[in-house]
Every structure is written in structure tokens, then in C-alpha cells.
Amino acid sequence: MLLLKISKTILSFAFAGAIFGATAVSANAATPAHSVNPARTTQSYYKPATTTRTTTTTTTKTTTTTNDSADAVVSLAKQLASKNIPYVWGGESLKGMDCSGLTDYVYQHAAGISLGHYTVTQESHVTKEAVANAKPGDLLFWGKSGATHHVAIYIGNQQYVAAPQPGQNIEIQTISSSFMPSFAGHVNG
């Protein structure tokens, strides 16, 4: 019964092809309907099935600071250390800054990143690392994670720029065992 239906379908297509001027493809009852025998055709209209493949490309944006922005951070921090800017608690301007005001100011102006004006808030913007692994532009933190009390910008060669305490200006200081940072942090975007 199935072969009879297949034969009728083939004959219908052959008839339609003859009416519209197309060359018919012949097949016999022993040939499955999906097969085309090139030896029995004068011209094959068989086209291999094509598959359309949609490819989605995902781009991951890296949000850590780049070398260029780290260089800009270090450069601006050093410039501020040479301007006699006094420590002012809660300050974040060229008239005066505290430690987290300094780091937030530098990152906003040099890298376009807002860290917030509180050391613990700034911790949430970094990938924490050992002080020995700090790279120029990273932040140095003093105190336990989640309860830090001081922050500065590492500039390389065991030095950092800090707003130390009332009565002092922003300055470059050297890491020492007597006032050792607890951990460092690489700033994320």
C-alpha cells in the first residue's frame, strides 16, 4: 500500500513537471522515495539539505584595571603627593583628603572608577591578594577584612601614596614591618 502511494506521488510530480516544462526524475517502486538514482535521470534537481547554523559569540568584558589605568593611577597619586595637600578627615578634594578620600579621588580621576569613601566599601571593589603580590596601582589595606581602618595606593618598589593622619600631607611612604599593610587588593571595575 505504501509503495503504491509513493508511486502515485512520484507520477504526480512527474506529470506536474511535464506540464511546467521541468525534467522529471524517474523512480521505480523498488526505489525509496527519498533516493535519487542519477543513472535514471536526465537532469537532477536534487539539492543536498542545507543546514543554517546560528553562532552566538559571547564577549566577556574584563573589569580589572589595565596597565594603562594602573599607570594613570600611580602617576596621579604621585602628583598629589607633591602638592602639599593636607590630611582632612572626610575630605576628598585638593583642599584636603583622608585616606579613603585619596584613593577614591585618584581612581575616579585617573581610571573613571568610583570606589566609595570608606575603606570597607573599597574592599568590595578589589580582588584581595597578599601584600607581597601587590602591583603598582593596587590598594593596600590595614586592619581585618571587613573592618579596615586605613588604605593607600601602592606605587611599586615597596612604596605607596597615603593620606597618613591629621597634621600631615599626602605623601609617599615605604612599607615597613612597624606599619605593615594587612592585605592588598587589585581594583575591579
Image: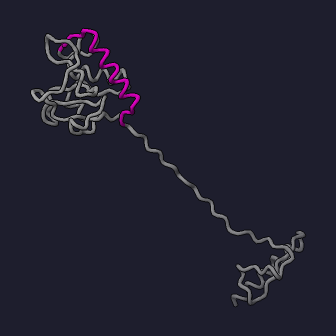
Residues drawn in magenta: 64-88
| Residue 59 located within the stretch drawn in magenta | no
Can residue 11 be seen?
no
Percent of width and height locating residue 151: 20, 26
Percent of width and height locating residue 123: 23, 33
Farthest-out residue, front:
157
Q: Specify the quadrant of the image occupied by residue 91.
A: top left
Can residue 180 be seen?
yes
Q: Residue at x 9, y 27 (%)?
A: 178
**In the visual, does 3 lie left or right of 185?**
right
| Residue 72 located within the stretch drawn in magenta | yes
Q: Nearer the viewer, residue 23 or 124?
A: 124
Q: Specify the quadrant of the image occupied by residue 100.
A: top left
Q: Residue at x 41, y 29 (%)?
A: 68
Q: Nearer the viewer, residue 3 or 98?
A: 98
- In the picture, the quarter occupied by the N terminus is bottom right
Q: Nearer the viewer, residue 92 or 132?
A: 132
Percent of width and height locating residue 3: 72, 88
Percent of width and height locating residue 56: 53, 51
Total labels: the figure holds 0
- In the picture, the quarter occupied by the C terminus is top left
Q: Specify the quadrant of the image occupied by residue 51.
A: bottom right
Instruction: Report the predominant secondary structure element of the magenta stretch.
Output: helix
Q: How is the image coloured?
A: one colour
**In the visual, does 81 lie left or right of 28?**
left
Q: Is residue 45 above or below residue 60?
A: below
**In the visual, does 46 lie left or right of 68?**
right
Q: Is residue 88 above or below residue 133?
A: above
